[in-house]
Image: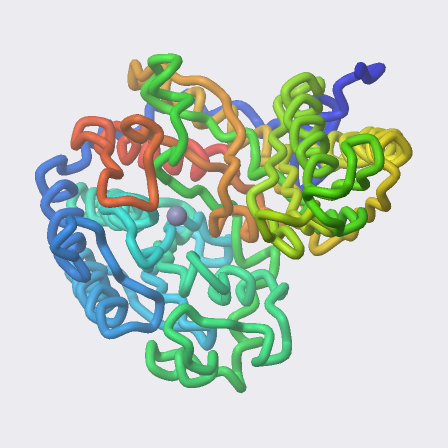
Amino acid sequence: MTLSSDPRSSHLLAGAQPGGSSLPAASPERLPALSINHTRLADRLEQLGRIGRQPSGAIRRLAFSPEDLQARGLVQGWMEEAGLEVRIDAAGNLIGRLAGRSPQRGCLATGSHIDTVPSGGLYDGALGVMGGLEVAQTLQEAGVQLDHPLEVIVFADEENTMVGCKSMVGRAPAEAEAYRTTIGEPIATCLERIGGDWQQRSSAQRRPEDLACFLELHVEQGGVLEAVGKQIGVVEGVVGQQRYTITVDGQANHAGTTPMGMRRDALTTAAQLVLAIEDMARHFPGDPVATVGKLQVWPNAANIVPGRVEMTLDMRDLSHDVIDHMRAHLQRKIENIAVASRTRIALEPQFVVDPTPAAAAVQEVIVQSCEALGYSHTHLPSRASHDAQEMGRLTLMGMVFVPSRDGVSHSAQEFTSPQQCAAGVQVLLDSLLRLDRQLA
Ligand SMILES: [Zn+2]
């Protein structure tokens, strides 16, 4: 399967999302030489990681749980210590703000989340928040005031409902029933507990002019940086996702009396599909991924030829077009397999998440920072969801990745060394200083 051109490249160059064009060249005036406090960063990550730590070493800090509240309190205290003006918006986002020399400007925003999956690690989300805080405190201690205001944001419930970032960009579902919180309580109760207000949640929405850009530091949660031996990942965008249910209908029948040639086996047909999907994603132009992760068989008995299979299909890529092309390719494959196996195969859409390209100009700034600081770097897509994916629908977005050991995340084994964390925060600081100049 070949395509006449890779739609991803044109998509990114076109900068379909806000602001793909280049920023004016930086002023020749030197950036202030600031170094973040490595010890404080490592110490705070460790302190935060004690909240919700399980005997296994995993961290359980579910959004809206007592642990989440405790962690938010700790971070709020650090924000105040760093001289930030703190508020909690109606969607439960905890926001610390430093005034800029030009208060009329939209702010430079950074941040991430401190809630975790039920069995999470120390760095996912926490590094982005601690990094933003460290940047703000470093600026304050050096007496450097940016031209733009600076905001450090702790987004509410990133790991599940994404109510914080989605409300901020005005894309949160309106009905309370649409939110299934991990702790199982209604969203209104949850928001109230962390200082938000369900009734007023639309007030959390920001206007594009409120924000000059959003830059998130995060651990990669994959193994690419480690494999290529680079210190910093310059994220090209957060991939889009299409989820389908595939149903194969054959004929359930006696496993003894039905000769092989007379079967309409839904499971062997599904097996052909699973392999066809893997083959397709491997050989498709670009770098897409496709996964069949869940499969149910009926009647699921040892002595019956399977009559029906339902399975999920998850496809992700930076380009919407690539996913659409894969779906069209798969549709043709399905027709052939159905005819040959005398089964009926249906492909039913479940949901679509649009990709969010990172602004080309912000990627350029991150590269400049890496080069100035002497860190090796590479460009890569983010294949996991992040707050930045929503924020990029509102403003210029960029993400900085640091390596995850063995590509492991959402696990007690999640690890990024103190040096790697510090490098990421130093790049975050340098990039924000550059953006402050270049966006002015
Ligand atoms: Zn995260």
In the depicted view, which residue is nearer to us: 314 or 135?
A: 314
Horizontal relation, residue 434 to residue 414: left or right: right
Q: Residue at x 85, y 42 (%)?
A: 343
In the image shown, does 312 or 69 lie closer to the viewer? 312
Q: Is residue 387 above or below residue 80?
A: above
The residue under the point 41% across, 43% down is: 216
Spot occupied by residue 382 in the image (x, y as percentages of width and height) = 51, 35
Position above or below: 136 against 196:
above
Image quadrant in which you'd find residue 425: top left
Q: Is residue 333 above or below residue 112?
A: above
x and y, in percent, of residue 101 in the image:
38, 51
Q: Position of residue 160 (x, y in %)?
A: 46, 61
Q: Quadrant of residue 134?
A: top left
Picture residue at 50% right of the left edge, 33% below the top: 438
Q: How many marks?
A: 0
What kind of colouring is applied to the model shown?
rainbow
**Position of 237 compared to 420: left or right?**
right
Q: Nearer the viewer, residue 355 or 295?
A: 295
Q: In this rendering, does residue 100 appear at all?
A: no
- Residue at screen point 38% across, 21% down: 225
Can residue 94 be seen from the camera position used here?
yes
Give the quarter of the figure containing the N terminus.
top right
Residue 60 left/right relative to 278: left
Residue 402 point in image, percent of width and height: 33, 30
